[in-house]
Image (cartoon, rainbow, N blue to C red):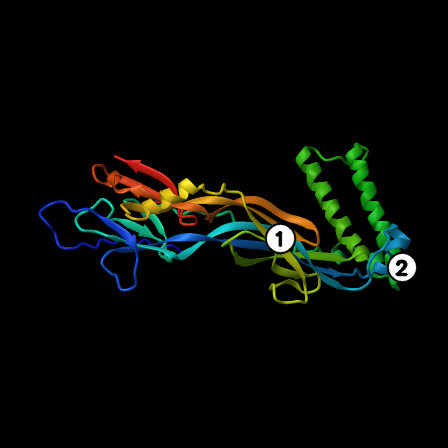
Amino acid sequence: MKKTVFALCMLSFTARAAAQDISPYLPGEDEGIVYFLPKTALEINVIATHVTYQPGELCQYANQYLRINNVNTQPETHWEIKQIEVRSAGVPDSTKAYIIKLKDKSAMSQVELTNDGLIKAINTSALERKTADYILEQPQRHENPRRYMTEDILLAGSSAKMAELTAKEIYNIRESKNLILRGQADTMPKDGASLQLIIDNLDKQEKALTQLFTGTTDREDKLFTFRTGAEEPFADKAALRFSRALGILPAEDLAGDPVYISLKSISPLPTATEEKGKKKKKKKLEGAIYNIPGKGKVNVTYQGKTYFEDELPVTQFGTTEVLVEDLFKKVNTRVIFNPETGSILKIDKD
């Protein structure tokens, strides 16, 4: 959760309107509003699926009566990688801590921060930014096949006889569906809704009885999150590991195979003239300091297969600029920042 901090710290009043200083924060300074600009960390979200297979009661007869080959007769569990997504996450940059020293009443006196001290807004409140939640697959309820067994099936004296009668019932269900769909049944549904209801019920019966031969498979998704730094470009860094038997593992656990992540800067390198300009600007800070993030191309692979490839904002590949103080002197200016990157999202004024 985010909390809003509205801070107003003032020094003694003077007869004239005083200017407002913004400077790098030094430990021990407490007369002002301290905020951090974020740096980018790469948040790796992995959805892995735990698959559980249970053989059916009549699995050994699947090929004989239903012509279904290669049915596994032993229970089995394993993991699969379903999805990998990487997002930019903002974390406080200890090298970019600033203090707003208020010498008089100022339009910049109202500052909204996150719990981590990252700047969110000046002179207004920022709306909560929601990220899309992942939809995780959960095990589905399996029908009890005995609900659809006939009396003859239930009274069968052997599993072989039960398999024979169950297979015949499956074929009868299929024939009934075909007759209804062709309009050749003795009693046809009165409307489309009734037709769909009957077909759905027959499908349910067929599936439940067929699972006596094929078995049941349950799939359950789990979300795993890892973070890695983005201080500079890198290639084929082991972000985590994966084992079909054990699932998602930390990068240092050698029981799994590595999942590699690469980061390449696609922001243009600053020219020598631009670098000199930046040094001149650093001599005096008059206004709100913010980030202009660069871009990085992120690629995630496992065993040669690409699971994620996209461009993401990376503050370390960008620059830091100053929103001039004059914007706040004559008009009521409101600024909303992106706490993940430290960039400006919106500027309003009266």
Q: Height in image: 26 above or below 197?
A: below
Type of amino acid under label 1: Glu
Q: Which residue is mark 2?
A: 161
Q: Position of residue 267 (x, y in %)?
A: 50, 42
- Residue at 41% over, 45% down: 319
Instruction: Note whether residue 134 is visible.
Output: no
Image point (29%, 48%), residue name: 283
> On the picture, is 96 further left or further right than 233?
left
Q: CA distance from mark 1 to mark 2?
A: 37 Å
Tell me the quarter of the picture where residue 186 sits.
top right
Residue beneath disc 1: 137
Expressed as whole percent of the image width and height from the top left, the position of residue 170 reads 82, 49
The image quadrant that residue 247 belongs to is bottom right
In the depicted view, which residue is nearer to us: 90 or 233?
A: 233
User: Residue 230 got which mark?
Assistant: none
Q: Nearer the viewer, residue 30 or 83?
A: 30
| Residue 224 showing in the rendered view | yes
